[in-house]
Image (cartoon, rainbow, N blue to C red):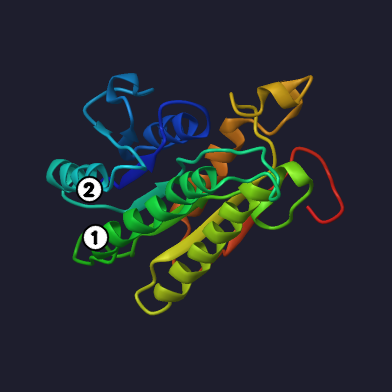
Amino acid sequence: MTRVAMISGASRGIGAAIALRLQAQGWQVSLGLRRPEEAPVFGPEVLACRYDALDPASEQQWMKETIACFGRLDGLVLNAGIHSSANVLEAGGDEFDRLMDVNVKSPLRLAQLAWPHLGETGSEKLQAGRIVLMSSLSGKRVKSAGSGLYGISKFALMGLAHGLRQCGRDNRIRTTAICPSFVATDMASSLAADSTALTQPEDIACIVAMVLELPSTASIADIPVHWTVEDCY
């Protein structure tokens, strides 16, 4: 039976690379995008749905359409997110709320919607599903004042990842957080003189694919990823 993965924020960058990688490896993919017409992959094994992290109804509809189309769910990749360069002294309430809504609350709601489907077992589904959250090294350390507000949201996302891991202890739904530093995407292009020296979206896609296909006997909490070497990561 072909495996099915949902990927949020799949129109470009890391999300698009993950979609391409999984499609190439034989997965059926359901893509959550604000503009479904901008889906980066096409074909009978691809479903493109409207998804807006600020619209909970779109999350419910996306899940409904995915199960109706494919009849199962094996992986949930929570990739959609937004950035902020504000330090914690400059942070306004509206910006903080938006970061938390997009980077934490929407992933929480999607995980709750996906959980019953990821845990299904049967003659053709011998392994429980997987959840991958796209966090950041900013969720493990705050490297500059300008990454402070963003870091708060990613630290919270790491808490969600560990909370989901604990919930999956008995039913073997495994959750992993991927924690990259800068990746060569639109978000980071203005921050590096040579974006080819950064971690590439395809590198992250390779790691995500590996995590999704690991057996239940391998439970990985998080994977730090850096294009170079810093003190801890």
N-term mark: 1 or 2: 2
Residue under pointer 1: 117
Mark number, residue 63: 2
Above or below for 79 versus 130: above
User: In the image, is 60 to the left or to the right of 227?
Assistant: left
- Give the Cα distance between marks 1 and 2: 10 Å
Query: How far across and how far down the image is residue 129, in percent?
Result: 35, 60
**Mark 1 vs 2: CB contact within 8 A:** yes
At label 1, counting other C-alpha atoms closer than 10 Å, the crowd grade (few under 14, some 14-19, many 20 or more) is: some
Q: Nearer the viewer, residue 216 or 42?
A: 42
Q: In this image, 33 relative to 98: left or right?
A: left
- The image position of residue 158, as x and y in percent, is 56, 60
Q: Residue at x 65, y 27 (%)?
A: 184
Please name the amino acid that badge 2 sits on: Met
The structure residue drawn at horizontal position 26% and vertical position 58%, both measured from the top left corner, is 113
- Label 1 vs label 2, nearer the camera: 2
Q: Position of residue 85 (x, y in %)?
A: 67, 37
**Residue situated in front as seen by the camera: 52 or 37:** 52
Residue under the point 51% across and 53% down: 211
Instruction: Please name the residue shown 37% across and 33% down the image.
Output: 23
- x, y percentage for residue 130? 40, 58
Looking at the rendered structure, the kind of residue marked 1 is His
**Residue in front for this viewpoint, 146 or 225:** 146
Instruction: Answer with the quarter of the image where residue 186 lies.
Output: top right
Looking at the image, residue 98 lies above or below residue 184: below
